[in-house]
Image: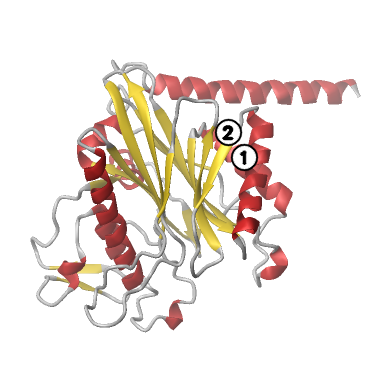
């Protein structure tokens, strides 16, 4: 009994030391920065159809509800998330989805002792939604927007325009840093998956649809930032459902446009969803994908999804190119990372970054 008690105490002490080391690590990242501690750490997490009963799917990959909620809360605590963009909240009705997200917030509150607000988007033609989780006890004053019933631009000019099956959502917050108050615009997106790709008439596993959605996300972000004014910081975060070399990844960043893939545009889409372009077609992107850039700079793998032995960055956080320095620490390293494994909580890892000005 005494041995067991000692083991429990040691385990608890180790856990406290672990949490303390995480906090110190976050502060040490900015120890050499004249800007001080970061103003905001935010995360993106695909919840893997949170709230769907395992019996409702042929796959048995889903965890039991209580274990899934606890595992997700563990990720949020470990990543020290302040604002959390979430995708795949399941619910046949809006009230069902609100209940599921509310249950996750309840577990997170129990773990942290903090209260949280949550915001939920629409699902005009789907049963999964996007949303945000924000703590109540901070100076953050969020403004939430649900972009519903908006048509997508078309790659092919003929035919009816497609619409979002699950609406993108945004959160705008104002924060004070060492260099003054700034607005941060966070746009949470979830592009179409490759599931049932055999039904896609373009034979690209719906990459054409993702390209159109990516073009919409990119243009919307530019429009919203223009309304907010010159000191606003734009962030795109969510589940891209395509890897970093895909056409949709390059379009959402602004490196390519849909026009580049039309007749005479210089680019074509291969069936593998890879891009072939004439020399000089690509341009400097408006937004920089942080996880992909960090992989190139450090050689450290930051994949967020694994499938059949292949690991990819499907969940990406992008920042405006001119604001890239705000995500670098005192030593010039990108303050970005992933948390979790591919079993507990979700089959997608959590992605996080920080802003400091």
Q: CA distance from mark 2 to mark 1?
A: 6 Å
Identify the image quadrant of residue 91.
bottom right
Identify the image quadrant of residue 300.
top left
**x, y percent for residue 266:** 12, 70
Q: Is residue 89 visible?
A: yes
Q: Quadrant of the N terminus?
A: top right
For disc 2, the marked residue is: 77
Q: Is residue 106 left or right of residue 290?
A: right
Q: Residue at x 65, y 58 (%)?
A: 96
In the rendered view, tell whether residue 147 sits above or below residue 152.
above
Q: Is residue 99 left or right of residue 159?
A: right
In the rendered view, tell whether residue 48 sits above or below residue 268.
above
Looking at the rendered structure, the secondary structure element under dot 1 is: helix
Q: Residue at x 67, y 42 (%)?
A: 70
Foreground: 164 or 42?
164
Q: Residues within 10 Å of mark 1 (few under 14, many from 20)?
A: many
Q: Is residue 350 left or right of residue 175?
A: right
**x, y percent for residue 51:** 65, 57
Q: Residues within 10 Å of mark 2 (few under 14, many from 20)?
A: some
Residue extending furthest right? 1
For disc 1, the marked residue is: 73
Identify the image quadrant of residue 225.
top left
**x, y percent for residue 350:** 50, 45
Q: Is there a contact, CB below 8 Å, between mark 2 and mark 1?
A: yes
């Amino acid at each position: 009994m005494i041995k067991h008690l000692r083991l429990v105490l040691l385990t608890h002490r180790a856990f406290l030391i672990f949490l303390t080391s995480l906090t110190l690590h976050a502060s040490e990242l900015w120890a050499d920065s004249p800007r001080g501690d970061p103003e905001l750490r935010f995360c993106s997490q695909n919840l893997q159809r949170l709230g769907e009963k395992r019996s409702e799917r042929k796959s048995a990959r889903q965890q039991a509800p209580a274990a899934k909620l606890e595992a997700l809360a563990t990720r949020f605590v470990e990543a020290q998330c302040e604002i959390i963009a979430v995708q795949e909240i399941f619910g046949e009705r809006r009230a069902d989805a609100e209940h599921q997200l509310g249950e996750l917030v309840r577990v997170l509150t129990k773990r942290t002792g903090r209260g949280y607000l949550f915001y939920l988007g629409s699902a005009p033609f789907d049963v999964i939604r996007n949303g945000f989780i924000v703590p109540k006890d901070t100076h953050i004053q969020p403004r939430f927007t649900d972009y519903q019933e908006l048509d997508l631009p078309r790659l092919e000019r003929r035919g009816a325009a497609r619409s979002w099956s699950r609406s993108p959502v945004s959160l705008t917050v104002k924060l004070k840093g060492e260099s003054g108050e700034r607005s941060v615009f966070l746009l949470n997106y979830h592009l179409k998956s490759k599931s049932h790709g055999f039904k896609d008439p373009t034979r690209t596993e719906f990459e054409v649809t993702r390209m159109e959605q990516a073009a919409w996300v990119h243009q919307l972000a530019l429009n919203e930032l223009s309304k907010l004014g010159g000191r606003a910081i734009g962030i795109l975060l969510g589940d891209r459902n395509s890897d970093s070399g895909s056409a949709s990844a390059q379009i959402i960043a602004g490196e390519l446009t849909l026009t580049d893939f039309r007749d005479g545009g210089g680019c074509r889409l291969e069936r593998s969803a890879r891009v072939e372009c004439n020399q000089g077609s690509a341009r400097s992107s408006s937004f920089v994908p942080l996880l992909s850039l960090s992989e190139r700079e450090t050689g450290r793998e930051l994949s967020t999804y694994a499938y059949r032995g292949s690991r990819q960055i499907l969940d990406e956080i992008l920042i405006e190119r001119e604001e890239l320095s705000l995500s670098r620490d005192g030593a010039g390293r990108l303050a970005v990372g992933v948390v979790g494994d591919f079993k507990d909580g979700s089959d997608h890892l959590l992605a996080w970054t920080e802003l400091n000005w």
